[in-house]
């Protein structure tokens, strides 16, 4: 069940407008002995408010790419343009601030604070993100709404150790929603869950496009990859397939005009 979480409208990024543009992105690691290319001249676009998969076998460069989309890692060459802004022109501090406002991150191993309840984990994200502009008195209600959106309204007072893996990942989804970012990114979000639990958590993540989120996930599972509305296939740091994004963006009123 999905409820509107909007306090900050996604209006600057209407559905199917080109939200993130990646241009000729290359990431190389140089050691004294050699230079290894992890991503090689990658160019693609992610449409707003859609479910987007980065797919490929282990070692193909998926996590490296995701980290550059959020400015956690920097390219060796090429550009990541989010809306109208080029990420790599920003300082580390400015990037961290930008990330807090624009991106919610969901990890494979949940990464909740073990000594805090589900509610407190979400409240902590609000504190770190200054509530996404919400006044302090509205934070608890906001956190409860995020937990409900993530499908976990009943267990807000439990510690992570008192929750199943699937429930912990739902807390992590709620935490990612806390400051109402336009984009959610998830690196193998169901990779640590049994298949039935994984299905439910994935459906919740996918449904967030209905409340205006752009959801970008990394997977090596072809079945999960096929669920995306648009997809990038990587192999050995190169794009070997692109599906859906161009068709979606071509049908966007903003792109046509
Ligand atoms: N900091 C690093 N130093 C050296 N090699 C790295 C580093 N980060 C990633 N790699 C290598 O780059 C390749 C892609 O890694 P990664 O992006 O984690 O792939 P994936 O997420 O698809 O499994 C792998 O071969 C990995 O070993
Ligand atoms: Mg990875």
Image (tube, helix red, strand yellow):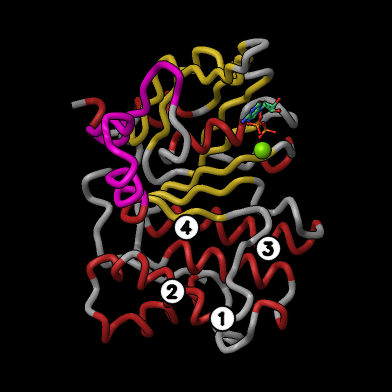
Label 2 close to label 1 by CB (< 8 Å): yes
C-alpha separation, residue under disc 3 versus residue under disc 4: 13 Å
Please tell me which of labels 4 and 2 falls first in the chain. 2
**What residue is rendered at 18% in x and 26% in y?**
257
Q: Which residue is mark 1?
A: 116
Q: Residue furthest right?
A: 194
Mark 3 or 2: in front is 2
Label located before the other in sequence (1 or 4): 1
> Disc 3 to disc 2, how far (Cα)?
25 Å
Mark earlier in primary sequence (3, 1): 1
Question: Would you name the residue on which mark 4 appears?
Answer: 208
Q: CA distance from mark 1 to mark 4?
A: 25 Å
Image position of 77 (left or right of 193): left
Q: Which residue is mark 2?
A: 124
Residue visible at 27% across and 35% down? 90
Residue span colored magenta: 75-99
Disc assigned to residue 200 = 3
Q: Secondary structure at mark 2?
A: helix
Nearer to us: label 4 or label 2: 2
Query: How far apart, in angstroms, are the residues tagged by discs 2 and 1?
Result: 9 Å
Which is nearer the eye, 16 or 69? 69
Q: Residues within 10 Å of mark 2 (few under 14, many from 20)?
A: some
* Image location (x, y in percent) of residue 223: 73, 40
Q: Position of residue 256 (x, y in %)?
A: 24, 25
**Splitting the image into 4 quarters, where does residue 17 fall?**
top left
Of labels 3 and 1, the one closer to you: 1
């Amino acid at each position: 069940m999905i409820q509107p979480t909007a306090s900050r409208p996604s209006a600057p990024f209407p559905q199917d407008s080109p939200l993130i543009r990646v241009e000729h992105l290359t990431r190389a690691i140089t050691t004294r002995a050699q230079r290894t290319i992890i991503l090689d001249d990658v160019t693609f676009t992610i449409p707003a408010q859609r479910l987007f998969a980065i797919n490929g076998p282990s070692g193909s460069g998926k996590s490296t790419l995701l980290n550059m989309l959020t400015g956690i890692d920097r390219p060796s060459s090429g550009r990541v343009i989010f809306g109208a802004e080029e990420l790599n022109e920003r300082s580390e501090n400015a990037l961290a601030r930008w990330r807090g406002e624009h991106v919610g991150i969901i990890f494979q191993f949940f990464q909740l604070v073990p000594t805090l309840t589900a509610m407190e984990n979400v409240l902590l994200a609000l504190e770190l993100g200054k509530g996404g502009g919400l006044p302090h008195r509205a934070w608890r209600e906001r956190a409860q709404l995020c937990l409900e959106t993530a499908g976990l309204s009943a267990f807000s007072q439990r510690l992570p150790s008192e929750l199943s893996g699937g429930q912990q990942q739902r807390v992590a989804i709620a935490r990612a929603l806390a400051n109402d970012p336009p984009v959610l990114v998830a690196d193998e979000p169901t990779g640590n869950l049994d298949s039935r639990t994984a299905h439910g958590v994935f459906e919740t993540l996918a449904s967030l496009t209905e409340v205006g989120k752009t959801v970008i996930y990394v997977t090596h599972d072809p079945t999960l990859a096929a669920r995306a509305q648009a997809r990038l296939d990587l192999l050995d740091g190169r794009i070997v397939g692109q599906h859906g994004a161009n068709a979606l963006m071509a049908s966007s009123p903003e792109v046509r005009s």
